[in-house]
Image: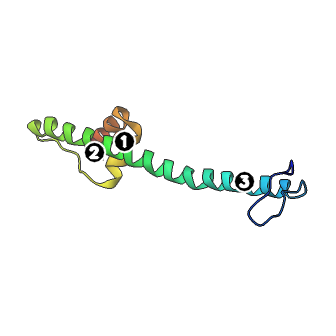
Amino acid sequence: MDARASFSGGEALAAEGLPIYMLIIFILVLAGGIVRSPLTLAWRILQRSAIGLVLLMIFNALAGLFGFFLPLNPYTIVFCGFLGLPGLITLCYLKTWI
């Protein structure tokens, strides 16, 4: 047998084709990172929004005893999700003074 690897077509892998295969693999890896990045961002936004929703629901349950509540809409949920407790305090301030 020949020392070079041969494929089903009988063609041997030439050294000239190697950079092209490496370029194709590099492009596929790069494209995978580009596709994965927006999905990771969307997943993080979804996770933080879920945390914001839970935070607002707990706050509304406790503050509802005193007649105070914050609306549950996408803006307040995302705001609380990304900023956490400081975001909740900011929303309370805005509702009280504006």
Task: Of the two numbered discs 2 and 3 on the same chain, state the one appearing first in sequence.
Answer: 3
Quarter holding residue 95: top left
x 78%, y 52%: residue: 22
Query: Which kind of residue does numbered mark 2 sit on?
Result: Leu
Q: Name the residue tied to disc 1.
A: 81
Distance of mark 2 from mark 3, alpha carbons? 42 Å
* Label placed on residue 25: 3
Tell whether label 1 touches label 2 (CB within 8 Å): yes
| Left or right: residue 17 compared with residue 38 | right
Q: Position of residue 5 (x, y in %)?
A: 80, 52
Labels 2, 3: front one: 3
Position above or below: 11 against 19: below
| Left or right: residue 67 compared with residue 46 | left
x 72%, y 56%: residue: 27
* Label placed on residue 53: 2
- Camera-side residue: 78 or 39? 39
